Image (cartoon, helix red, strand yellow):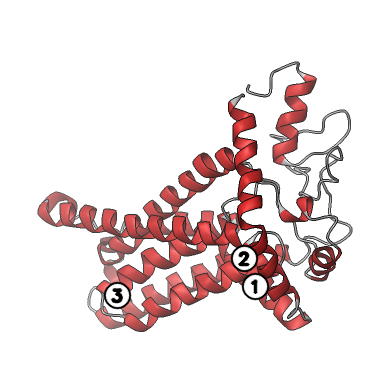
Amino acid sequence: MTPILLAATLGERINEIFYGFDMWAFHFFGSMQNGFLTALAQLFTTIGDEAFVIPTAVLGLVLCCFKKTRKFGFALVFAIIIGTLVTNVVVKPAALRIRPYNTLQGNADYWKWYVGAGQLSESDYSFPSGHTTAAFEIAVSMALVFRSEGKKKIAILLPIIALCTMGSRVYLMVHYASDVLCGLVVGTIAGVCGYYIAVAICKAFEKSKALDGADADKLFKKFEDKQKPKYIINKCIICVALIAIFCAAYIPSLSEGGENAIRCAYNAEYDCQNEAKHDDDKYPAIDGKEYCKMHWKEKNAEVNGESAEE
């Protein structure tokens, strides 16, 4: 059996093992659907979207340049790198688990809840949840840093927000509950690793006078004699940046999904409801049809006479 067939069997095996649990979770969230909770779920799910995570990682790089925020920056950046690599480079390609809105099209209850939640879709595989991983890698790494700074209330709040993001993925019917639980584990481990890597790096900076003296804050000398106002202004700048990043990710998401969304053209084993990569030059139309990321690769290999393993 080829590696790809083995991986596909792994995804199917996960479906079999967690079927009862996953369907119970869908029934639990589906039974409570209403307009308010759906809007709330769409709000929280944005925190795990790449449109939010990537700019947040860039903000983390900026924070690395300032001595007072160095630990936050390094923890954030390394947590995101580790979580992304494990989820998108290692686990998803190994499991190849197909999204529930593709595998459960014959389940009338599920389909009713999926449509009721807005018919959102992704363009890749399902296991584990990338949104959940992202939410927890950010929340856990930042919570540990805040806790080390004595700010326990913020440290408690962040994982709660991540849990809401986790629940939103099942509520919106785009992930199995087992997907988000795996994302929780991966994200938590990534967050813890990111924090301890940041601690180690900051200690290395402290041991080196040259490195410890590297501080972009020196560029703002006009605030040197106004330490408290400067501190307040810096916090405000970071908060405004995060709010702007969130809004830039959330507002476009309001028009996603629904009956008019551009879906993948694949309709062999099932009528693929994944988002077609119609606006990505890396995935051009094949024979005039648009495909999601996973089916584009399969179709492109077929058209070019390549083997599935290639």
**Residue 8 is at least partly visible in this image:** yes
What quarter of the picture does the C terminus occupy? Answer: top right
Query: What's the distance in space between the residues labelled 3 and 1, CA to CA?
Result: 26 Å
Three-letter code, disc 1? Leu
| Residue at x 83% of width, y 29% of height | 286
Residues at circles 3 and 1 in contact by the CB criterion of under 8 Å: no
Q: Earlier in the sequence, mark 3 or mark 1?
A: 1
Choose between 45 and 245: the one closer to the eye: 45
Q: Between residues 164 and 250, which one lies in front from this camera angle? A: 164
Q: Which mark is residue 260?
A: none
Residue 131 lies in quadrant: bottom right
* Residue on which disc 2 sits: 46
Q: Position of residue 200 (x, y in %)?
A: 21, 54
Circle number at residue 147: 3
On the image, the x and y values in percent for residue 13 come to 62, 45
Which residue is label 1 attached to?
Answer: 43
Q: Secondary structure at mark 1?
A: helix
Mark pair 2, 3: CA separation: 25 Å
What's under tag 2, amino acid-wise? Answer: Thr
Residue at 75% across, 73% down: 30
Residue 247 visible in image? no
Question: Dot 1, crowdedness within 10 Å: few (<14), some or many (≥20)?
Answer: many
Q: Is residue 21 left or right of residue 84?
A: right
Tell me if 300 is positioned left or right of 185 in this view. Answer: right
Q: Amino acid at mark 3?
A: Arg
- Asked which secondary structure carries label 2, the reply is helix
